[in-house]
Amino acid sequence: MSKTIRLTMAQALTRFLSRQMTEIDGKKVPIFGGVWAIFGHGNVAGVGEALYQVRDELPTFRAHNEQAMAHAAIAYGKANFRRRFMAATSSIGPGALNMVTAAALAHVNRLPVLFLPGDIFANRLPDPVLQQVEDFSDGTASVNDCFRPVSRYFDRITRPEQIIPALNRAMQVLTDPAECGPVTLSLCQDVQAEAYDYPESLFAERVWALRRLRPDRSELAAAVAALKGAKKPLVIAGGGVLYSQASDELAKLVQGAGIPVCETQGGKSSLPDDHPLNMAAVGVTGTSAANRLAEAADVVLAVGTRLQDFTTGSWALFKNAGRTIIGLNTQAFDAGKHWALPLVADAAEGLAELSAALKGWKAPATWTDNAMKGKTEWQAAAAKVTASTNTAYPSDAQVIGAVQRAMGSGVTLLHAAGGLPGELHKLWQAGAPGSYHAEYGFSTMGYEIAGGLGVKMAKPDQEVVVMVGDGSYLMLNSEIATSVMLGLKLTIVLLDNRGYGCINRLQMATGGANFNNLLKDARHEVMPDVDFAAHAASLGAVAEKVASIAELETALAKAKKNDKTTVLVIDTDPLVSTEAGGHWWDVAVPEVSSRPQVNAARKVYEERKQMQSAGD
Ligand SMILES: Cc1ncc(C[n+]2csc(CCOP(=O)(O)OP(=O)(O)O)c2C)c(N)n1
Ligand SMILES: [Mg+2]
């Protein structure tokens, strides 16, 4: 019989979490950076008491909103290239459900996070407890079942010993590059407090390492043969390049073979923006340089990408009928999408083996030279739209230019929703890997500020710049106060175009009337005039409204020097976006309508649909 220790289930859980380690740059560090917590009756007595016991090894952080704290936890995992992560615990009912959207965000983006929501009593004696929904036909149902479709692993702990295999499975999922995603351990309130004689071996220190799968020999041979036959090869770099920390291997392959590279939202900063072979953004929000190549490419090596519609232009971008896609991905689900030749492997391992096998082979020089010419043309177009201006209502692009000039490429830039993702994907000149942090898998309004906090926890020495629209800001801004409380400085640039600018533009592009997006087009008695600077100041930030691009640059230079979260507000034009580059995006237009504008848009839509490949 092995030695045991009598602990509550919650004490066993927190003790276990505090003993999980990993190695970063040869140094052993805890794999959990901490636990975000908002307590209620569903977790304060059990998990809360247990977190207090381990507070020195596993710090607990208090937030203002469960969704926001989960955003911070997820951003921390992303900024750490999934090598370290955090947990988030809530009470039952509304606290738990507030985390479900964030769980989906992590699920879509393949990011590790451990959710620990409280759940109803397993013994059912006090039912219905405060915040319990009652299902008339299913006694086992609780709101936490909502986590099931948005978790990579879900478990409900109804007996204290169940936490032993559940923790094992949780760690497997959180640390496996292919399975990686959110894990939910739903903790029945009474069971959190129940004691059990746990084997001491459960609490032995464990050091988790990144699993790097090497390619299958026949898949590698097929990929090499396809590339050697290519006249117009192109690499798409996705987030998997960053999570595998494969930038060097990517650079080596493409420099050796003269293959141009383009980047998804998740993969941007795989190569620095000024790398001569980096054509930058691809797809709906792509550069003209990248999209021209994507249209013509005969072999597309898609590395670590989910090939979502923004990347593939809703599958209308790749126009070469005979093209082959090679899917280099740790997850077979992604590697074989659209009948791609699968190359299931870690990105760094796969790229290194491709480099070795392609040694001496080069893409036709005309293809590579043309690509670089296209990049020069794009850079000229980008310089024009980001140049300084005196206008009272600058475009998002002009604000991006100001932020780039004032902050340089050494900062980590974060964004998630609105018009900014498209503009930043095209125009931001990223530096080191991970310096461009986009949440554009789920594009969750309200990710930005809390996400910035998570990035700052992961990279305390980095300047973290958050760019956010007025809509996203109003949806979720509470963690400004947490950033001030924790002394974690963010520089937040708020672009106020008085409404949901990008959806208003989409509405117009699909023939719709201006309706319910910009504040002026929404039903109102009084036109809102939100004083964002006063609001941010009330949460403890240094805040300023600037009147021009020049003032913004001056304020940013000042913000760089102070060590407190700063919010800079600038009015912008809701109607302007960058026309250069870009690609059609499939947004279904009504087939019949009394509006002639809709009928006209439908006609164009039907034409564009002809370009879409149906899975070939
Ligand atoms: C939680 C959530 N709700 C709705 C949407 C759909 N949506 C995407 S962008 C957007 C408007 C964002 O407004 P703002 O932050 O002001 O940015 P802007 O479009 O004005 O640039 C909306 C409603 C979303 N992405 N996330
Ligand atoms: Mg807006």
Image (cartoon, rainbow, N blue to C red):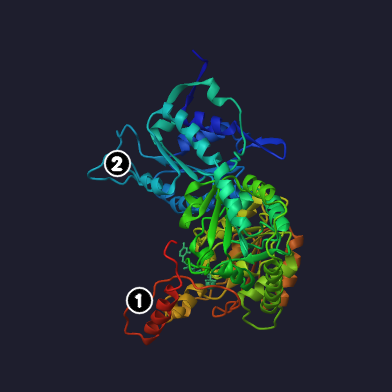
Query: Quick one: 118 or 545, which is closer to the camera?
Result: 118
- Disc number placed over residue 590 in the picture, else none: 1
Determine which quarter of the picture holds residue 368: bottom right
Does 51 sit above or below residue 567?
above
Give the percent coordinates (x, y) of residue 556. Answer: 72, 67
Residue type for callout 1: Pro
Nearer the N terminus, badge 2 or badge 1?
Answer: 2
Going 66% across and 54% down the picture, which residue do you hit? 434
Query: Badge 1: how crowded within 10 Å, few (<14), some, or many (20+)?
Result: some
List the residue tagged with mark 2: 128
Give me the disc on residue 249. Answer: none
Instruction: Tell me what residue is drawn at x 65 percent, y 49 percent.
Output: 354
Viewer can see residue 586? yes
Give the vertical position of 125 relative to 68 (above or below): above
User: Depth check: 301 or 220 in front?
Assistant: 220
Horizontal arrangement in the rendering, residue 82 relative to residue 90 (left or right)? right
Q: Residue at x 46, y 58 (%)?
A: 338
Q: Is residue 437 above or below residue 468?
A: above
Horizontally, residue 548 falls left or right of residue 522, namely: right
Is residue 64 in view from this perspective?
A: no
Q: Position of residue 453 (x, y in %)?
A: 61, 53
Quadrant (top left, top right, bottom left, bottom right) of the C terminus: bottom left
